[in-house]
Image (cartoon, grey):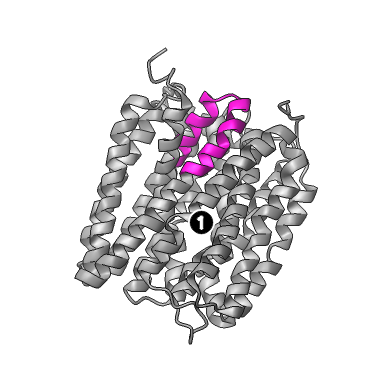
Amino acid sequence: MTSSESTSPKLWVPTLYIAEGLPFVIVNVVSVLMYKSLGKSDGEIAFFTTLVAWPWMLKPLWGPLLEMFKTKKYFVVATQFFGGIVFGLVALSLQLPNYFQISLALFAVIAFNFATHDIAADGVYVNVLSNTLQAQYVGWQGAFYNVGKILSQGVFVIIAGKLEKSIGVEPAWMIVMGMFGVIMVVLSLYHIKFLPTGGSSGTVNSVKEAFSTFGDVVKTFFQKKYIGWAILFLILYRFAEGQAIKIVPLFMRASHEQGGLGLSTEELGILYGFFPPLAFVLGSILSGYFTAHRGLRKSLLILCAFFNIPFAVYAVLAVVQPENFYVIESLVVFEYFGYGFGFIGLTLFMMQQIAPGKYKMAHYAFATALMALGFNIPSMLSGFLSDYLGYKTFFIWVIIATIPSFVAAWLVPFRETEAVSQ
């Protein structure tokens, strides 16, 4: 056993999920704020920033290949380093006349790269940790995924907002994107020493054998008991969130005359920079212990309620349009706590009900991709729907759109008995 194989999960779970959360939030949320500052429309921003994020949904197409070659650690380190370089290219592209097309293309590369990273990172997690440790550390996983959100959507948006005022919008975002690149390179160097290999991949001696293995991965996934119900659950659980997540920051930035809250880039960074992520971390950790004690089957509907009901705060904000920053902050904190608590249900369902079997890493990737499908399709259309309905009616619709996730959580069957910790 190598030294990295015996490393405590506390030394690599936090940094691994910072590295997983950071690029996802940058592509899906921070890019939205950047393009808003650069003058793009809501519909254009929501559609194209979701379009370039589709590799997170399509990763099953190449996920099984990672079961065949090298180690999972190899792919984690390589994609972190390469992704850091591409973030640097995004920074450079912002000074070009056709920056929008070029930066979107680079974000698509980043999405493909880090979708690959996520397959390997989750593969390390599910292969190295036992079911008991998975449940114990799932709160840490969610918490430090959210640290990536704190850095990207909070701290660096504050920096961007301050720089926008002092040196201009374009140079501000060039600096911030370059800093994201440096973080990813540093994380790759850290993981060379501390990340477990996650187990060696199988040896493939021919193209025919590779295709045969890929076919077996797909076949065994769809042969899992209750897989149809599981797929429906994964697609519907985030249906409301997928519609809200692109529009919330745009709503926050829009003027009161446009139906928004009129916050600046810097104010939005301050809003998300500490208390909401802290609430998410607290919700994630408490949910991990709550679910480990009760078992996922008994907890799932409760977790679904925690996840979905707090989205109503945005309807309240859209109707009232408060100008008091602390009122806005308090409501967002409430939503983030519920989001962190409820997301654990989805994560554990994928780990315990879908991933187990011969191809844990690939099947977990299939599950996360199907989850992304339920998120991306409504997200792509959310900007046009919001433009048509207006923010107030749109967020009322989001509340209605939570109903399918409750139905799915109530009806989804479990394929095996859980071991509930005492």
Report if residue 85 is visible in the image: yes
Q: Percent x, y for residue 146?
A: 47, 48
Q: What secondary structure predominates along the stretch shown in magenta?
A: helix
Where are the magenta residues, as a range?
118-144
Q: Percent x, y for residue 96?
A: 20, 68
- What residue is disc 1 on? 276
Q: Percent x, y for residue 56?
A: 48, 50
Front-most of 233 and 19?
19
Q: Residue at x 62, y 73 (%)?
A: 315
Figure quadrant of residue 286: top right
Front-most of 412 and 321?
321
Horizontal side of 47 relative to 92 (left or right) equals right
Say above or below: 165 vs 223: below
Q: Residue furthest bottom?
A: 257
Q: Residue at x 31, y 32 (%)?
A: 190
Inspect the image, locate mark 1, and give the three-letter code of the amino acid beneath it.
Pro
Q: Percent x, y for residue 1?
A: 42, 12
Horizontal side of 240 relative to 328 (left or right) equals right
Say above or below: 188 vs 263: above
| Residue 121 is inside the magenta segment | yes
Q: Residue at x 30, y 63 (%)?
A: 160
Front-most of 165 and 68?
165
Q: Residue furthest top?
A: 1
| Residue 380 is inside the magenta segment | no
